[in-house]
């Protein structure tokens, strides 16, 4: 049962600022489907239109053209928001409220009340490790604490679909790991998570699918595993540098090259070639300490895609 | 309905965090205490004599004493309230705040109405505290219980509601508090009193028919805060009732129109 959580078609947003003189096309004819039960990461450089997309989906800003559905309902309504959670970038809370009161406020606006709400608030503040700050006014919160409160707030109504705009922004490394764990846990409970980020290595760790957005245009969308598929490229570490004296056809063909102190890189076409190389090294008495298969990182893909797109545009 | 109430309630919380309203409640409380002490010390008989001796052509003297205290304080209350409430809507519209609110299952209309009623509720509480306080002290002192005096709570709050609708409209359009505050003060302190005088008294000095009708027209369009806080409040306080409903009805029409425009702009606004 893989239904669609987010569905957009031809979604376009043009902002016209300073009395309509200057126009910014923040999103250009975006068509995207996100299935339920996954973590989807939307990546893109600053100003790519990531936040704009979320705002359009949540009715915070209105599309210039195109349409979109979330959880099967058109975005013009507001009733489906009972099933949605959102952590905006640069979120602000009424500074005169304490963390607990902020949760009360948003909980009530999400249609919750009484002991059910109080229980949920305690549970969530515990989850994001703010329980002991519950009575502290939010104006005294640190940036990371605000971010944790924002996450807790987004989970109040037990949402089916959660939008997170830079959720780990300003959070320390341990906190980031904790947030990632929470997100994976949510996914395992059947929730759909839509994540905006430019922390690529982090996104790579948890997302199932990613979309890469640049200047309002979706450059690529797909499965993270497929995108970062292994290359037939290896990295090997050996003891000593006796390998430099070896001069063999096989090694030359694999473009065997020294990377640094102990590491060498090489490419092979198949497993047989790989084993031939290993045999050659072993018969020459070389001690292999470590061997790694090189992967395309999301970062490499991202950077090359963006560069390519910008070059095309320049031409 | 429930969502509007939640927004109203938290606007009230916001107002309490703004020290201005506490400041006004404190002033009211101090005035009430002084009043109670002064009246408590003075001779009841001499007052009663004056009261019964007062000419009935004037308003009831007890109400006059009440109004002497309530009038300047309620005027001050509105001045402070305009200042304190001008930022309610702009703060709600700040980036990061509005995003969060709009992601909740709440309609944009409900958000704006909540802010609107919240502002009004704060003023209602302040005015009610002052008026009921004054009324209680006087009523106890003279054993004279005239409930009609309490209706002025509604007129004064209504006056604020009209001014606040302008603040909301300009808050939604400009996303700032300064413009709304300035326009509200301008109407309350200058324009409404001037047009009130102008429509009969000053008109004599003006030759041009065109300007005359312009002033008359402006008089009907601009909210009549001068009359609401002046003649109508006085009449209600003395139990005379309302002679001319025109200032109330035209001001109400202004309020409805202004809020209608605010809501339709807010519904379409990008954040
Ligand atoms: N309210 C607005 N009015 C005018 N232009 C806007 C508005 N909001 C965004 N933009 C423009 O739209 C473009 C996309 O902005 P958006 O905030 O969606 O980018 P983003 O991908 O979220 O960037 P970041 O990674 O910096 O958060 C930018 O060029 C921005 O200047
Ligand atoms: Mg953004």
Image (cartoon, coloured by chain):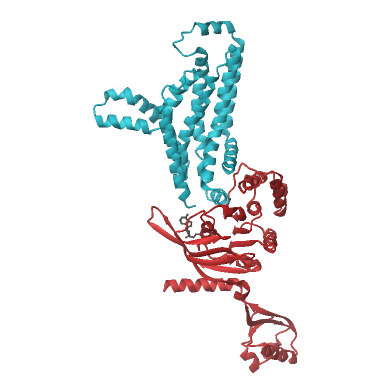
Q: Residue at x 46, y 25 (%)?
A: B229
Any idea which chain is the red one in this picture? A
Residue A294 vertical position relative to residue B199 in the rendered view, above or below:
below
Q: With A243 as the anchor, is A312 left or right in this view?
A: left
Residue A167 in sight: no
Q: What's the colour of chain B in the image?
A: cyan
Quarter holding the N terminus of chain B is top right
Image position of A114 (left or right of A306): right
**Residue A100 locus on image (x, y percent):** 67, 45
Q: Residue A52 placed where, x, y %? A: 51, 59
Query: Up-down: is A299 above or below A57?
Result: below
> Residue at left 47%, top 52%?
B270
User: From what the image shows, is residue A289 above or below residue B246?
Assistant: below
- Of residues A197 and B63, which is closer to you in this image? B63
Instruction: Tell me where residue A227 appears, x and y as whole percent.
Output: 59, 75
Residue at horizontal 64 percent and vertical 56 percent from the top? A159
């Amino acid at each position: 049962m893989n239904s669609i959580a987010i569905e957009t078609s031809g979604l376009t947003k043009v902002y016209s600022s300073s009395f309509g003189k200057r126009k910014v096309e923040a999103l250009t004819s975006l068509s995207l489907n996100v299935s339920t039960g996954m973590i989807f990461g939307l990546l893109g450089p600053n100003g790519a239109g990531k936040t704009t997309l979320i705002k359009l989906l949540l009715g915070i800003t209105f599309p210039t053209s195109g349409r979109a559905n979330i959880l099967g309902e058109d975005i013009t309504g507001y009733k489906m928001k009972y099933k949605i959670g959102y952590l905006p970038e640069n979120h602000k809370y009424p500074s005169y409220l304490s963390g607990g009161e902020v949760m009360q406020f948003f909980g009530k606006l999400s249609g919750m009340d009484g002991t059910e709400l109080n229980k949920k608030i305690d549970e969530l503040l515990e989850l994001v490790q703010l329980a002991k700050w519950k009575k502290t006014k939010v104006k005294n919160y640190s940036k990371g604490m605000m971010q944790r409160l924002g996450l807790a707030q987004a989970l109040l109504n037990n949402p089916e679909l959660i939008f997170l705009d830079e959720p780990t922004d300003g959070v320390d490394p341990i906190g980031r790991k904790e947030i990632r764990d929470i997100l994976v846990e949510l996914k395992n409970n059947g929730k759909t998570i839509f994540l905006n980020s430019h922390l690529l290595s982090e996104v790579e760790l948890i997302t199932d699918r990613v979309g890469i957005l640049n200047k309002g245009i979706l450059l690529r969308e797909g499965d993270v595993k497929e995108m970062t598929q292994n290359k037939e490229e290896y990295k090997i570490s050996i003891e000593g540098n006796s390998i430099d004296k070896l001069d063999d056809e096989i090694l030359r063909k694999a473009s065997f090259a020294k990377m640094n102190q102990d590491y060498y890189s090489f490419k092979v076409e198949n497993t047989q070639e790989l084993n031939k190389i290993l045999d050659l090294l072993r018969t020459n008495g070389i001690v292999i300490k470590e061997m790694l298969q090189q992967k395309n990182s999301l970062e490499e893909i991202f950077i090359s895609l963006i560069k390519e797109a910008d070059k095309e545009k320049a031409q | 309905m429930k969502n509007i109430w939640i927004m109203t309630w938290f606007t009230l919380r916001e107002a309490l965090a703004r020290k201005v309203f506490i400041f006004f409640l404190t002033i009211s409380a101090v005035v009430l205490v002084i009043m109670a002490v002064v009246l408590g010390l003075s001779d009841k008989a001499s007052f009663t004599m004056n009261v019964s001796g007062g000419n009935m052509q004037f308003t009831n003297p007890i109400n006059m004493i009440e109004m002497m205290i309530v009038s300047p304080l309620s005027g001050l209350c509105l001045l402070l309230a305009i200042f304190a409430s001008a930022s309610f809507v702009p703060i709600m519209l700040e980036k990061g705040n509005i995003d969060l609110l709009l992601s909740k299952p709440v309609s944009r209309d409900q958000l704006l109405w909540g802010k609107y009623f919240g502002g009004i509720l704060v003023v209602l509480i302040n005015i009610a505290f002052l008026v009921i306080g004054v009324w209680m002290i006087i009523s106890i002192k003279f054993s004279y219980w005239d409930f009609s005096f309490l209706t002025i709570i509604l007129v004064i709050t209504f006056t604020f509601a009209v001014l606040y609708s302008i603040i909301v409209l300009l808050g939604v359009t400009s996303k700032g508090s300064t413009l709304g505050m300035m326009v509200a003060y301008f109407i309350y302190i200058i324009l409404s009193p001037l047009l009130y005088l102008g429509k009969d008294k000053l008109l004599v000095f003006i030759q041009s028919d065109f300007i005359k009708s312009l002033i008359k027209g402006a008089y009907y369009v601009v909210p009549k805060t001068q009359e609401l806080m002046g003649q109508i409040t006085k009449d209600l306080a003395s139990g005379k009732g309302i002679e001319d409903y025109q200032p109330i009805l035209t001001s109400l029409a202004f309020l409805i129109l202004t809020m209608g425009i605010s809501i339709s702009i807010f519904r379409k606004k990008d954040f």
